[in-house]
Amino acid sequence: DWTPGAMVDELAAQVKETIGSDRAICALSGGVDSSVAAALVQKAIGDQLTCVFVDHGLLREGEAEQVEKDFVAATGVDLVVVDAKDRYLEALAGVSDPEEKRKIIGREFIRVFEQAARDIVADRGDEQHPVKWLVQGTLYPDVVESGGGTGAANIKSHHNVGGLPDDMQFKLVEPLRALFKDEVRKVGLELGVPEEIVWRQPFPGPGLGIRIVGSVDAERLDILRRADKIAREELTAAGLDRDIWQCPVVLLADVRSVGVQGDGRTYGHPIVLRPVSSEDAMTADWTRVPYDVLAKISGRITNEVSEVNRVVLDVTSKPPGTIEWE
Ligand code: XMP
């Protein structure tokens, strides 16, 4: 019968048999699936695996550190961190169309990841043990949704990271292909992946880039990051993390409204809270977060983030609204 320990041993044995003495790479996003896949492959083949974390600067407060420190400490993976923050800011400058932003974020990811992969091949691969395998955190629902077969990985990776290049000469290894999310979480905990990662709510690949309505720049990212941190802290303190599917915090960067603070007029930006309840993100309802929790979040954001003078709650279900604003 199913125990996480037996599952880990069996999956690790399969990975070892598949990869043998070759080398593998894995793109870490900080999300549950890629983290658990990486931890499992690490257990199977140790330092034959190199993980690549592309820091695009669109993550929330503390997330890059979580990958760089906590995940590495817990799993011992060989990690290459690519600081691509400036490159992304440059590429995104002045762009406010949501799909255009997604395209740019995906394209830059491919370029940065490809370069990192080439460097790893040059640095760590030798002729006898070439870097042959690309680890992906594809789950069973991803396989089913896309009709099975090898196309599944492609669809999922497009969604997550904007797609990997066709001419990339890696074979895919997808150790979680037979598992559901709850099983992946159990396997992750068994492997020692930190709870904060295992229980993470979904977060889109393009990150805060699609939570700023308007163009993306360093200052706007900083405002959103501070507001988002407060919302997350208070939702966690209220014990709501596992009731809420996810809670996008959105900065309406091109909107300003008049407010008053002390005896002065303010002219600041609104922040939107978008807590949703869902089973699978295909449909969703807005979560009835208790008023006192909302009041606390609103009070803290308007007090602590001087650029924000209004906090609004999104009470739209999906459909007709999507979960994200972009
Ligand atoms: P929507 O906004 O379409 O979101 O209701 C459904 C789920 O998908 C996530 N999402 C994305 N994930 N890349 C991703 O990896 C994206 O471009 C993207 N857009 C939306 C969203 O956070 C929600 O969980």
Image (cartoon, rainbow, N blue to C red):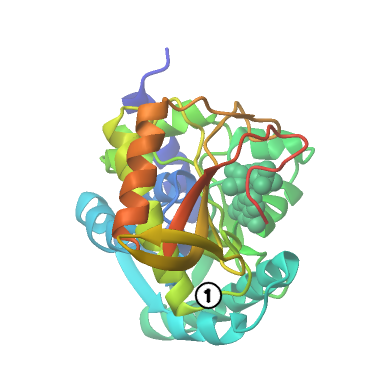
Give x and y (percent) for residue 71: 28, 54
- Residue that appears at 56% across and 78% down: 114
Q: Is mark 1 on a helix, strand or loop?
A: helix
319 lies left or right of 16: right
Residue sitting at x 47%, y 72%: 220
Query: Disc 1, ligand 1: is the CB inside 8 Å?
Result: no
Residue 52 or residue 295, whichever sits in front: 295
**Along the line of sight, which residue is nearer the eye, 193 or 272?**
272
Residue 66, located in which quarter of the rendered image? bottom left
Residue at 71% in and 34% down: 318
Q: Work out whether residue 110 or residue 48 is closer to the camera in this orientation and state it.
A: 110
User: What is the residue that sits farthest to the left in this orientation?
Assistant: 73
Tell me the residue that label 1 is attached to: 113
Q: Is residue 314 left or right of residue 242?
A: right
Residue under the point 75% across and 50% down: 151
Amino acid tagged 1:
Phe
Q: For the residue carrying disc 1, how many other residues have a C-alpha within 10 Å: few (<14), some (14-19), or many (20+)? A: many
Is residue 34 visible from the viewing direction of this image?
yes
